[in-house]
Amino acid sequence: MRKLFKALAVTALAVTASFSVAKAEGYPDRPISVMVSYGAGGATDFQARIVTMMSGNEELLGQPMVIINKPGAGGRVGWNWLATEADADGYTLGVYNIPHFIAQSIEGGVKYSADSFEPIANWGTDPAVVIVPKDSPYNTIQELIDYAKANPGKVTLSGAGLFVGHHIAALQIEKAADVKLAYIPTKGGGAAAMKAVIAGEVTGGINNLSDAYRAREAGNVKILAIADDERDKDFLPDVPTLKESGYDVDDSSVNFRGIMARKGTPPEVIEKLAKAVPEMFAHKNVAAQMKAGGSPIKIMNREEVAKMWADRQTYLAELLKDLKK
């Protein structure tokens, strides 16, 4: 009897594996949803719609990717949903933002960590920048910091949420300049944070380079500094880094963006996505639209993204511990 049960178990496993492979070979046979944890119109949403637009090409995935927005709590709402409720079948993927979801998992109070997801590919990086309204009296980061030192807590800066890149940059600036700032996380992500600056509801903001670039082109904001190790020579060559301005702020807040799947997605599906998605990101039409939108591209494959996640996990655990002292 034991031999019979063992034989049946082996047969069942073989049938399951065969079925899984068959499903993967036909994957995808319908549109794929891609969840963005921020509202429509912000940098993540804007870029996600561009980088997925060639998905339907037969030489790529042959099916369109459809963006669905699940904003709230600086990305927590969407990533909680992806980690615990979304189907792990390859037809519901998600956009990741690093350092956001890793920093949030380190701080706690969420249902996800890097182990909840499978990295697929990275499409770009987006440094944080300090911005003020177009009619602000501040024209340099030094002028803004000087006012903040003379008026502790009175400089209000909007950002996309708690323990996202914007917040990390604000914490770094506070420590480097020995100043007290009032960081205000907005509902709706970067788009809402930008609107608050343009409307003059806050002194300024910390936002994404890509959003700020478009807002400056429209004549709505001034960009005072960039939180990166070097100036952005392609889009903001005239904007100094915070380091150049005398503040020890590095690239810790730079926003990496890409696509991931829920843990448990069939490995055959992951493999197919890992091959097609970087090619999709590299399409010439994608590159042209990303450049027009002031959005830096940095394509990384699955293995490179996995290493980046692991490195950032270790680094952010120490950084956050230090910033909260």
Image (cartoon, rainbow, N blue to C red):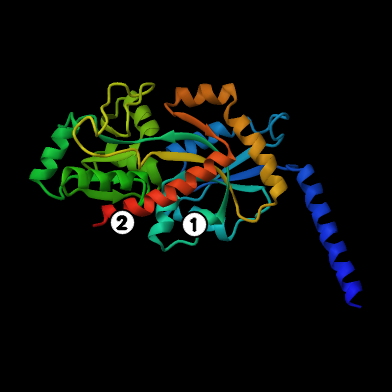
Q: Which residue is mark 2?
A: 321
Front residue of 102 and 9: 9
Location of residue 151 with respect to 226 vertically, above or below: below
Residue 62 found in image quarter: top right
Please say whether residue 307 is visible from this viewpoint: yes
- Spatial distance from mark 2 to mark 1, Cα to Cα? 18 Å
Position of 162 compared to 132: left or right? right
The amino acid at mark 1 is Ser
Please provide percent x and percent y for residue 111.
Answer: 49, 62
Q: Which residue is mark 1?
A: 113
Please provide percent x and percent y for residue 123.
Answer: 52, 34
Please provide percent x and percent y for residue 308.
Answer: 48, 43
Position of 52 compared to 74: left or right? right
Q: Residues within 10 Å of mark 2 (few under 14, many from 20)?
A: few
Please provide percent x and percent y for residue 9.
Answer: 84, 67
Query: What mark, if any, has residue 203 been given in the picture?
Result: none
Q: Residues within 10 Å of mark 1 (few under 14, many from 20)?
A: some
Identified at 45% across, 61% down, the residue is 110
Position of 162 compared to 313: left or right? left
Residue contact at pointers 2 and 1, CB within 8 angstroms = no
Please identify the quadrant where the N terminus is shown. Answer: bottom right
Looking at the rendered structure, the secondary structure element under dot 2 is: helix
Residue 249 found in image quarter: top left
The amino acid at mark 2 is Lys
